[in-house]
Image (cartoon, grey):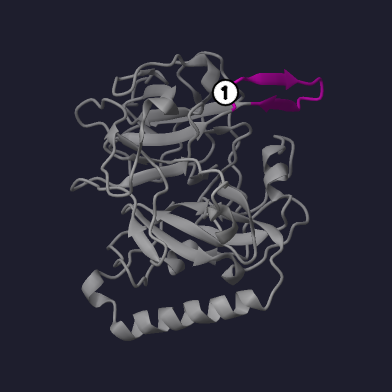
Amino acid sequence: FRLRSFPAAAEVAPAAKAATKAGEDNAAAVALQIDDEPCAVMLSATGLIARTSEDALERWENRSSADKRVKDDQIISIFPTTTRSSYGLITSAGRLIVAHVVELPVVSADGPLHVTGGVHAEELIGMTENTDPIRGERVIAAIAMPTADDSGDHAAEPAPLALGTRNGVIKRWNREAPTTMDSWPVIDLKDGDEVVFAAVAEDDDRLVFISSDSSLLTFEAKNVRPQGRTAGGMAGIKLAKGARVAALNVEAQVAWTYEEGENGLTSGSGAVVLTVAGDSDALPGTENGAAKVTPLEMYPTKGRATGGVRSQRFLKGQNTLILAWVGLYPLHASTSAGSPVELPKPDMRRDGSGVDLASPIAFIA
């Protein structure tokens, strides 16, 4: 999703940082005055973040392709927490910014899940005391942060956080972190690289890379050893010359089930791969492209740092993936104006050529 750029570090005024510190102190004071109630935090593909009722995660996981679509319903991060807890924002520059749940607006729990009425996540990362914002930085994901109650001797260690970059690097951060900072780097990025994805990754989960030249590589997360926050990660996918990572995700629900009723409605569960083929010379956002949705189960696992297998066959006039996504079925796609984009039915051919879309996809989750 597109977010505006932030000022360079030298442009952040000391007075602004002082105001930020005052705001943090005020947030802490407010938090102490409210009950610590269960809730859920949601971040949308359109860049909005908010909190809602605690049953949101269950409702999101049980959504159906027959559900009514609404604006800002493409949710890329969702997790349970409490109103007096903190959460983290992961940025494309490899920074983690700590923020407070209590400061987030509350969105309605009635009807389809959505984040309309939330605050733009970009507004929360512009000013931090311990690290400076970076020009062009944007929010990639939101994550739950351990609470004071989680730090006891018998508390379970939080699962590693997988971070993937545009140049094919993968890292599992072991969640080792300072306790008195409002932000810190979670990966040492090489020049010209950026984080494109972040999510919790247990050992048994599957990591899935898709490159712009249609190569898909999937392997178990345990093949990537957890590292501290200053490490730079390791090779994830072997990219061909000129290719980049188009999508990366962590999936636990690989097994695929699908039913199609007599009324035309369909139901399915499990992870699917969406790829949209197009022309690299077309102006971004103007080409509809040809889309294909295929269960992740159809793609074989291979070793880390290899090239993967083809995920979509290019036809005449196509030479790149203009969009790719891996997530639980059903996927939600929308135009830049928020109108739903109908996706094709699941295709069991892992390297099929796809179906022409009626509109360009701007947001997907």
What residue lies at 42% left-to-right and 21% top-to-bottom? 312
Quadrant including the C terminus: top right
Image quadrant where residue 329 sits: top right
| 180 relative to 240, above or below | below
Q: Residue furthest front?
A: 153
Q: Residue furthest right?
A: 262
What residue lies at 42% left-to-right and 27% top-to-bottom? 222
In this figure, which residue is indicated by the disc labeled 1? 254
What residue lies at 78% left-to-right and 56% top-to-bottom? 110
What residue lies at 59% left-to-right and 49% top-to-bottom? 78
- Measured from the top left, where is residue 190 in percent x and y? 20, 45
Q: Is residue 295 left or right of residue 38?
A: left
The residue lying toward the viewer, choosing from 170 and 44, is 170
Magenta residues, start to end: 253-269
Q: Is residue 158 visible to us here?
A: yes
The residue lying toward the viewer, choosing from 256 and 22, is 22
Q: Is residue 325 visible to us here?
A: no
Q: Is residue 13 left or right of residue 145?
A: left
Magenta stretch: includes residue 265: yes
- Measured from the top left, where is residue 47 in percent x and y? 49, 57
Magenta stretch: includes residue 28: no
Mark 1 Cα-neighbour bin, 10 Å: few <14, some 14–19, many ≥20: some
Residue type indicated by callout 1: Val
How many discs mark residues in the rendered view? 1
**Element at badge 1?**
loop
- Measured from the top left, where is residue 177 in percent x and y? 39, 55
- Measured from the top left, where is residue 350 in percent x and y? 48, 15
Image quadrant where residue 171 sits: top left
